[in-house]
Image: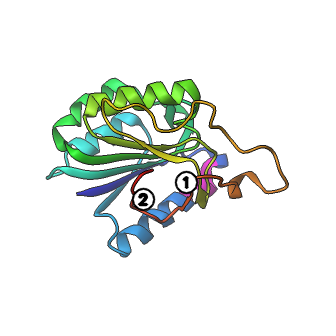
Amino acid sequence: MRVVIYDDDRAPEQAFLRRSWQAGCALQKALGLVDETFAASTWEQAFAWLTTRPEKLTSIQYWGHGHPGEVLMAREPMQLSDWAAVKPLITRESLVWFRTCSTFQGEKGHAFSEALSTLLDCTIAGHTRIIGPLQGGLHTRRPHEPASWPIEETELPPSRVPPWLRWGNNTIVCLTTQVPAGW
């Protein structure tokens, strides 16, 4: 089963992103790229929903906000320990993909990806850059393997290009649901 959870933060300043994530989820589902989507306002809601899925989870995408080594929902950080309840639904072939800005960036991003890939014993994907419709800096981390990207990989230098269009290396578009091999 392929699922997407997105941040349903109702703060007025989050309205555009929430609607964008909602539309993206509806489009992915309509195109048959994912099986189910869920709007969550809290991590508790998200993990409760995940644990009630009727079959193994081959892909979990989370669309929301992030910082180096952190994934946020309604401005609250996710706790790695919350994944213990989901672990029985994940196989070694599963993919957990954080479509969040900068979660894999720097030392904190390396530590986060190592801890979660080891805990879940599956591949974790995330970004080292600020993302938008173009999502750059995508990398994967397999359990018990070193990170394949340098700690120094961060946001591109400032330019005239708006932040939501910066992409750099390993860039995909927002509606892609497969991580290219080798990323």
Residue at x-position 53% and y-position 36%: 103
Q: Could you say which is closer to the camera, residue 6 or residue 172?
A: 172
Q: Amino acid at mark 1?
A: Asn
Q: Which quadrant of the figure contains the N terminus?
A: bottom left
Q: Are there few (<14), some (14-19), or many (20+) residues within 10 Å of tag 2?
A: few
In the rendered image of this protein, does residue 133 appear above or below residue 155? below
Q: Amino acid at mark 2?
A: Pro
Residue at the bottom extreme of this rendering: 31
Circle 2 SS class: loop
Residues drawn in magenta: 14-19
User: Quick one: SS at disc 1?
Assistant: loop
Looking at the rendering, which quadrant does residue 119 occupy? Answer: top left
The answer to if 31 sits in the magenta stretch is no
| 58 relative position to 113: left or right | left
- Residue at 65% across / 48% down in the picture? 12
Q: Is residue 59 left or right of residue 161?
A: left
Q: How is the image coloured?
A: rainbow
Front residue (pair 59, 104): 104
**Residue 48 vs residue 55: left or right?**
right
Residue that numbered label 1 is attached to: 170
Q: Magenta stretch: dominant SS?
A: helix
User: Dots 1 and 2: beta carbons under 8 Å?
Assistant: yes
Q: Is residue 10 above or below residue 44?
A: below
Corner quadrant of residue 66: top right
Q: Is residue 16 magenta?
A: yes
Residue assigned mark 2: 180
- Where residue 164 appears, x then y in whole percent? 69, 55
Name the N-terminal-most of marks 1 and 2.
1
Residue nearest the viewer, comparing 29 with 39: 29
Query: Residue 174's x, y, as percent?
Result: 52, 62
